[in-house]
Amino acid sequence: MTTETHAATGGREGNPLWSSRLTFILAATGSAVGLGNIWKFPYITGENGGGAFVLVYLLCIALIGVPILIAEIYLGRRGRRSPLATMVHLAKQDGRSHNWKWLGIMGMTCAFLILSFYSVIGGWSMVYVGHAFNGAFIDSTPDQIGALFGGMLQSPGNLLFWHTLFILIVLTILAGGIRSGLEKAVNILMPLLFLLLLVMVGYAMSTAEFMTAVEFLFKPDFSRLTTEAVLSALGHAFFTLSLGSCAMMAYGSYLPENVSIPRTAITIAIIDTLVALLAGLAIFPLVFSNGLEASAGPGLIFQSLPLAFGQMPAGLLFATLFFFLLLVAAVTSAISMLEPSIEWLEEKPALNRVKATAIAGAAVWVTGLLTVFSFNQWAELHPLAFLPVFEGKTFFDILDYLTANIMLPLGGLLMVLYTAWCIKPMTVIDELKLKSGTAALLLPVMKFVSPALLLLVFVYNLL
Ligand code: PHE
């Protein structure tokens, strides 16, 4: 971390920047790689029938995700302020409407809402570190593993405890200037997670149903592709790249001038996608070999992987390590979700970093209660059931749907529209240091292709 001049930080006096491109990549990858890759991707792929869904998801990453990731990081670096202040500042500078501030407000709110349920799931991974370490999976049957998961959900007190602990960890990291510690931790832990996933895939290859799983993931069966599946694939592309919620904008606000944003964005997208696909390859062979349901929903990894750990040599060690790394991946994502809110609060004269962190943290903890009770006391409560899309959905389901399928894509759409239509093309080319070939490709994609695809999916879904 270095402190650069007033000019380089766009007016944030003495504000720190990431120490290098690599550090930014690590932090941004830390944000991108999280529960989305290992927990969510497999279960929504299972719910949406496999191959065709995966194909649409990959297309969304390439055609919509990467251009928007570039736009979001770029806006953050241009503003060098909290997302809200950034949008206000940029709109003024580019002679655009003050209402662009709503983009900052929506993104910040969205990241906040995501964290409220993310932290409960992060709590699950802590519970599972404990189970793994105590040998709870050894020689267990699918029924026993299922009961372990069900038992956890039934106890609100238990969920609340771990949700609280998770939030406290996140706040501790966020409160204390963080980055050098975080940078170092991510440096070791991310590659370790990758390696461990490879070990898991290696184990999965030895099971009877490995090829069934490969087919399930990579052989598209378009008859199973529903409109809802397309919308979830799009939403998940946003979720997994941390897009549209101003998290990447906030991280981009600390990015040194000389770093190439397009190259960096592509690197992040590739790593993130690889992790998700590896997770799928590790999990589905076990699901099929043990006669589990691919469409089991949010409990999928917590019910499939423990079976494998219970049978493999040194399973206790691998299981403990795996759930620990899942926790690390969740934490490094979670901190990026609160950074926009904290950056915004920090701009208030009366608040310093620590106070801002405490306020944001308390608010997100309370909001998290909605998710804690969604799995037990309020499991049958469907608060917005009068709207057809929310029929049968708990608070958790609603938060998940609203953020991933609506707010993130909408935020991303506005970011790419602002970049492509509200900033002078010459400025974009100049500030992103685009070579003429790249500019000829990227600008039209940002101007037309990504927005059109996004709108298409939206409108199609509305109809
Ligand atoms: N990308 C994170 C994951 O895959 C989730 C996330 C969403 C992080 C939005 C920040 C903002 O788990």
Image (cartoon, rainbow, N blue to C red):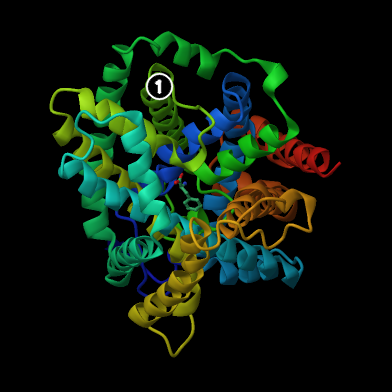
Q: Residues within 10 Å of mark 1 (few under 14, many from 20)?
A: many
Residue where numbered disc 1 is placed:
281
Residue 393 % position (x, y):
64, 52
Q: Residue furthest bottom?
A: 350
Does residue 260 appear anywhere in the picture? no
Q: Which residue is drawn at 41% across and 85% down?
A: 351
Q: In this view, does 293 lie to the left or right of 177?
A: right
The correct choice, above or below, for 420 with respect to 89 in the image is above
Near-viewer residue (289 or 245): 289
Q: What element carries label 1?
A: helix
> Callout 1, which amino acid?
Leu
Quadrant of res 396:
bottom right
Quadrant of res 220:
top right
Q: Is residue 224 left or right of residue 187?
A: right
Q: Residue at x 68, y 40 (%)?
A: 446
Residue 267 % position (x, y):
43, 34
Q: Quadrant of the C terminus?
A: top right
Does residue 370 appear anywhere in the picture? yes
Q: Does the residue labelled 1 lie within 8 Å of ligand 1?
A: no
Residue 7 % position (x, y):
44, 68
Near-viewer residue (82 or 118): 118
The correct choice, above or below, for 10 with respect to 218 in the image is below
